[in-house]
Image (spheres, rainbow, N blue to C red):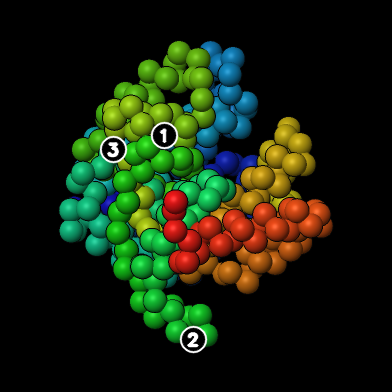
């Protein structure tokens, strides 16, 4: 069974539409992905005392996309318009489908938020180092992809994910129940909660075969969150950088540039010491006591 792709895009986001269409064209994927018009805020005028306008628009967009594809004969690949593809994305997605990797899951993300904590960094770093082989210059020679189970893990994203064709109606019913009764959490956190409860099965392809744009991040995607303060914006940016670093074709130099530009802090001698200890804690020489 193959898959059908959709990219979600607001009518007023013409620049983002051009960017995602250029991204698809670069990887010769235009024939696989159709535009899906995003809902702008609470477009269905549903009861909503909890979510901000953008969160409601995101929830509604993904909900309506599933509604329109309830009887789709193929798996779905749903992406948002700030996604970046690796050159291996289509090949890995097809392999995941062909080898039955999708059969055990309702949703498989192609990348996700990485919590900024020692345990998460150590786990993902160890897995990444086992999966990716680089030459002396740092160029990737080979990558072994797998689907990791996200049950019990902190994850949050709707930027790029596969929906098992057999699970479309199941997910639609879950979304319908939530969105029509004053949704309490954004859609990505709803997915995480349902996975933690065992209601749905969620996985993620690793190393990540997609990511989100860092270029202009402090001005574009972060500007979309104008209602939050600067420190919260920087926290979001830190998560985006961590996520990009586990992208199979992630630009570590660009990640370093963003860290140095936006996140570097003089701190004090104690902070510098603790930073070094945290670096050691995610390295190969660390042993849990």
Label 3 Cα neighbours within 10 Å, binned few <14 / some 14-19 / many ≥20: many
Does residue 286 show up? yes
Does residue 211 show up? no
Looking at the image, which residue is at 62% across and 26% down? 52
Q: Where does residue 240 sit, x and y in percent of width and height?
A: 59, 52
- In which image quadrant can residue 192 be found? top left
Position of 133 with respect to 100 (left or right) is right
**In front of the other: 181 or 253:** 253
| Marks 3 and 1, the one that precedes in the sequence | 1
Label 1 Cα neighbours within 10 Å, binned few <14 / some 14-19 / many ≥20: many
Alpha carbon of mark 2 to alpha carbon of mark 3: how far? Answer: 39 Å
Residue that carries the numbered disc 2 in the rendered image: 136
| Marks 1 and 2, the one that precedes in the sequence | 2
**In front of the other: 114 or 44:** 114
**Which of label 1 and label 2 is nearer to you?**
2
Disc 1 and disc 2 in contact, CB within 8 angstroms? no
């Amino acid at each position: 069974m193959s898959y059908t792709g959709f990219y979600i895009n607001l009518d007023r986001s013409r620049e983002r539409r051009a960017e995602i269409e250029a991204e698809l064209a670069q990887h010769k994927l235009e024939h696989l992905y159709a535009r899906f018009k995003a809902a702008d805020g609470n477009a269905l005028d549903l009861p909503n005392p909890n979510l901000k306008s953008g969160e409601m628009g995101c929830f509604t967009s993904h909900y309506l996309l599933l509604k329109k594809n309830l009887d789709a004969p193929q798996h779905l690949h749903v992406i948002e318009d700030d996604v970046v593809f690796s050159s291996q994305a289509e090949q890995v997605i097809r392999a995941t489908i062909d080898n039955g990797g999708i059969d055990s899951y309702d949703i498989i993300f192609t990348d996700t938020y990485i919590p900024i904590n020692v345990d998460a960094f150590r786990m993902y770093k160890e897995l990444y180092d086992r999966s990716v082989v680089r030459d002396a210059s740092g160029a990737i020679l080979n990558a072994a992809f797998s689907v990791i189970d996200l049950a019990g893990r902190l994850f949050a994203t709707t930027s790029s994910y596969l929906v098992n064709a057999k699970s479309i109606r199941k997910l639609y019913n879950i979304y319908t129940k939530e969105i029509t009764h004053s949704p309490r959490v954004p859609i990505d956190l709803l997915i995480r909660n349902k996975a933690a409860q065992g209601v749905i099965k969620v996985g993620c392809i690793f190393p990540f075969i997609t990511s989100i744009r860092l270029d202009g991040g402090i001005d574009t995607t972060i500007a979309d969150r104008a209602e939050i303060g600067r420190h919260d914006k920087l926290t979001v940016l830190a998560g985006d950088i961590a996520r990009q670093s586990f992208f199979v074709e992630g630009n570590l130099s660009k990640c370093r540039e963003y860290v140095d530009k936006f996140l570097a802090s003089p701190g004090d001698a104690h902070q510098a010491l603790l930073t070094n200890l945290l670096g050691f804690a995610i390295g190969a020489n660390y042993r849990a006591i």
